[in-house]
Image (tube, rainbow, N blue to C red):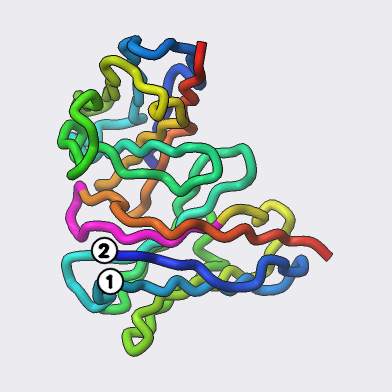
Amino acid sequence: QVQLQESGPGLVKPSQTLSLTCTVSGGSIRSGSYYWSWIRQPAGKGLEWIGRIYPSGSTHYNPSLESRVTISVDMSKNQFSLKLSSVAAADTAVYYCARVLNSDDGGADYWGQGTLVTVSS
Amino acid sequence: DIQMTQSPSSLSASVGDRVTITCRASQSISTYLNWYQQRPGKAPKFLIYAASRLQSGVPSRFSGSGSGTDFTLTITSLQPEDFATYYCQHSGSFSWTFGQGTKVEIK
């Protein structure tokens, strides 16, 4: 059974960089059948896609966040990570990592439980 | 960017009711449309991919249809565990977009 677990600081100061890691168990992050995504959800609001990374290291980002986002992968640890720079209160949200089937109609079939990140001084 | 618009934003229904949620894309997306269910405090659950294909393990009372710009998610005979928020999501481009969600509440 594939499991994903987000980890990282729950509180980040404004203008600093938010850093989260997603640890994948029960499956290899190297598998070309899948890619890996970050999605966030402010309290009481809808889902916002942040970006994705393929096992090759290739990435795609939400155009509205692209200038501040970096997603990377660590094959040796079976992890992928999110960095979001210059954060503000609007970046306060539950952040989810997810596995996505690598096809045009692929969806996110496994999700982490989510981790709340609050941006506040 | 392709925008996804769901309707209604919320609805009230009773156990056993048939429920239909609509998702409209701002331009044609063929059948690159997925549906998710999210219960309060939980991560989304993947229900349907390619507009109409049921994800493994999802009850058959859930079904999806549509292509191009107009899509529907139907729940026949609503069960207590189905009271949740449902999101559509466009998958067929470099950038994903989600609908704003439809909350299904108990009448």
The chain letter under disc 2 is A
Q: Residue at x 53, y 38 (%)?
A: B40
Q: Residue at x 34, y 69 (%)?
A: A53
Q: How many marks?
A: 2
Left or right of B92 on screen, residue A8? right
Q: Which residue is mark 1?
A: A26
From what the image shows, is residue A6 above or below residue A65? below
Outermost right residue: A121
At mark 1, the secondary structure is loop
At mark 2, the secondary structure is loop
Task: Give whichever of A121, B2 is nearer the camera.
Answer: A121
Give me the disc on residue B97: none
Task: Give whichever of A70, B78 is nearer the camera.
Answer: B78
> Which residue type does callout 1 highlight?
Gly
Provide residue A117's location: percent of width, then percent of height. 65, 61
Q: CA distance from mark 1 to mark 2?
A: 5 Å
| Helix, strand or loop for the magenta stretch, by majority | strand
From what the image shows, is residue A96 above or below residue B10? below
Left or right of A11 on screen, residue B74? left
Q: To which quarter of the image does residue A73 belong?
A: bottom left
Task: Give whichever of A67, B71 is nearer the camera.
Answer: B71
Q: Is residue A50 visible?
A: no
Q: Which residue is mark 2?
A: A1
The chain letter under disc 1 is A
- CA neighbours of label 2 inside 10 A, class few (<14), some (14 to 19), many (20+): few
Provide residue B72's location: percent of width, then percent of height. 28, 22
Magenta stretch in the rendered image: A95-105
- Tell me the quadrant of the picture where the N terminus of chain A can be found: bottom left
On whether residue A117 falls in the magenta region, the answer is no
Q: Is residue B90 visible?
A: yes
